[in-house]
Amino acid sequence: MHTSAQQFKPQAHDALANPVIRKNFRGAMDFLRNKRKGVIPDDAEFHALQKVCEQIKQQCLAELPELLEQLEKNCLANGIQVHWAETPAEANAIINALIDKHSGVDVVKGKSMVSEEIGLNDYLDARGKSCIETDMGEYIVQLAGEHPSHIIMPAIHKNAQEIGQLFHDKIEDTPFTTDVDTLINIGRQQMRKRFEHAHIGITGVNFAVAETGTLCLVENEGNGRLSSTAPPVHIAVTGIEKVVKYLADVPPLLSLLTRSATGQVITTYFNMISGPRKSDEKDGPEEVHLVLVDNGRTQAYADEQFRATLQCIRCGACMNHCPVYTRIGGHAYGTVYPGPIGKIVSPHMLGMENTQDLPTASSLCGACEEVCPVNIPIPTILQRLRTQLNQGNADKRTLRGAGSARKASEAMIWKVWRYLCVHPRLYRLATQSVARLRKLVPLVKSPWNQGRVSPKPAPKTLNELLHKKGKTNANKPWMIV
Amino acid sequence: MSHANTSNPNGINKARNNILAKLRGAPKPEHIATLERPTHNWAEVADPIAHFSQIMETNHANVYRCNQADLPATIEQLLAEHQLTSTLASKDVLTYFPELERKIPLAPQTDLTEWKDQLYNHTDACLTRAYASIAATGTLVLWPGANEPRCLSLVPPCHIVILDTQRFYPTLANFIEQEKLAQGLPTNLLLVSGPSKTSDIQQTVAYGAHGPEKLLVILLDTE
Ligand code: SF4
């Protein structure tokens, strides 16, 4: 199933009507919220640490170009080669060329959202390379020919029944089962041989530490460790916003990341890679590469308010707490990053013309901002995005595809409305006409009254009522009563 | 093409220059609060060893405790208890505790490619040492290197690890600071807080996803 951001509305509609999707997401979101609550018992502690994490990320962003250079310098000194890509196409070409350089065909990949963002699997597939996802959730969605529906738990939209059936259908000699231990063991066995013989391992990066040239990976399964340890070449791919200045910045960010994401005080593994193996080491990759990807991030960076989008540490808490995400699930958005973070980051990656509906898919309830470990003002950013979407003034269109949702008819209606509001006689005439013709209003077909009772205007306008009361000047209704 | 975008002191680097130029062209924030980066104030731990053991066990690891004289007997006991027959120990461990070699043989001292099959397909458990431990989160710090390949703690289904009880730090922040890690890190430093696990199928926890299914921690009381 492939979805696209342009089809958000029909996709959301379908998801809402799908009881399995509704049940799987409701259950998963309740589970993740409770887990988070269990390790954030103290609001004051959370807010204090949230402030620290927000400030760390803000400071790091303020110095981003310098930190990227420092990271590059220290990585190079450690023997990690650094590559830069402005677009997904460039990033894919870099990775593909590295694989070719080592005559690699077997690629194992640990969980990496940036590799999803650049469409790496399809790119490599088309070039005869087999890139297997090794994170259990990612493996499941890859086997099903789907994409992740959650950034932390990729297969959250499927239940054990569906996964048992998938394994039975797709993996040879696999009897159907819904026993989770058995299913995980099947996955483990499938990937063991691949790890043993893979040429190239690809992973993401959670934090890249500028002062030490270190790549940090957060995970529970060990597939990230295997992907970065077993093959002779390790390629890490990440967005430019993942850099932090100091090693000492890592502990607070890590603490809130794992607690917000999965409700763990720390994940099973925290892997800090500061170079390829030394000559006396007996295992570990001989080469380590870091690919730094822009893909629209510099656009977000250019605006001080949109820049906050780049504070994100990809914990997924905003989606877990979003009333919209909980009901429609991750695929309906049609973007790699779903939910609140997806709505604010995707327009920079894909252009506003391709993500028009996303900023509107929010009740602006603010739950996302409240739980965000780095305090990103998501609702405020959504409102700014809406303004950009409908921006009429070409000079103020700063984002790619800004103004693309602007409709001449809508703009005209607002213009007329504004005119009426500053011309009292016309205003009165207009409201009086609506009041007189009130019986006709329900006949007007609009999206509003499909499924809602049509509003019926009062027989007399407020002005008329006040006038009748004879209190004071009807032209100055604000002065009375 | 890739080389054009690769950091190469002599090469032209279009993507790099464009990205940095765009970032530099952006407005500088007017005011950024200067942050006192706190070190270890959010988790003081009263009894580190008890706290560590409790979290480790909640995370499905087995914790044992003994002194140096009892170490061989403890190892023997847990090999029997978990029915571990084909085992390997790192050179690091055996250098500290040579008496253990009679229980667990030394891992080959050659490049792993030469004994990959043995490690991947014919080894039940490996014994390594922990460099230190972080009490607040129930975390072991592993410092693999020339005498302790990274895969020993990763590939076999069981990982046995010896931790000196003198080597406790309250928090990760404290550990980083005390050990002056910002001045230099090993090629690979690992924090391990339990056996490998996943909740990717219907939020049900399963152990041994890719790494060891069992983690046996021996707390060693030294003088
Ligand atoms: S926006 Fe905040 S809550 Fe959402 S994924 Fe990013 S860091 Fe987490």
Image (cartoon, rainbow, N blue to C red):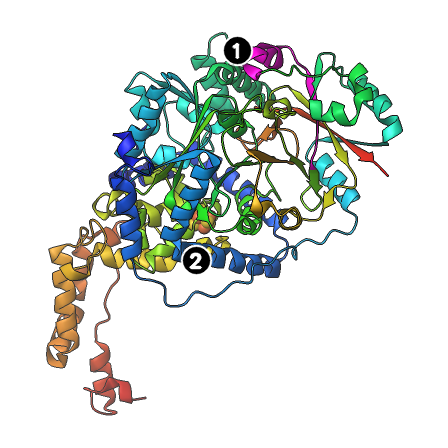
Is residue A324 visible in the rendered image? The answer is no
| Along the viewing direction, whichever of A31 and A218 lies nearer the viewer | A218
- Asked if B155 appears above or below A374 in the picture, the reply is above
Lower sequence index among marks 2 and 1: 2
Coordinates of residue B216 in the picture (x, y in percent): 73, 27
- Position of A437 with respect to B174 (left or right) is left
Q: Chain of mark 2?
A: A
Q: CA distance from mark 2 to mark 1?
A: 52 Å
Coordinates of residue B102 in the picture (x, y in percent): 81, 15
The residue that mark 2 highlights is: A58
Coordinates of residue A385 in the picture (x, y in percent): 28, 55
Crowding around mark 2 (Cα neighbors within 10 Å: few <14, some 14 to 19, many 20+) is: many
Are dots 2 and 1 in contact, CB under 8 Å? no
Quadrant assignment for the C terminus of chain A: bottom left
| Along the viewing direction, whichever of A249 and A122 lies nearer the viewer | A249
Q: Quadrant of residue A392?
A: bottom left
Pick out the residue farthest to the right.
Answer: B69
Kind of residue at badge 2: Gln
Element on which disc 1 rests = loop
- Position of B200 with respect to A377 (left or right) is right
Q: What residue do we see at 71% from left, 49% from top?
A: B170
Crowding around mark 1 (Cα neighbors within 10 Å: few <14, some 14 to 19, many 20+) is: few
The disc placed on residue B21 is none
Coordinates of residue A297 in the picture (x, y in percent): 32, 47
Q: Which residues are magenta?
A: B111-131
- Confirm whether the magenta stretch covers residue A418: no
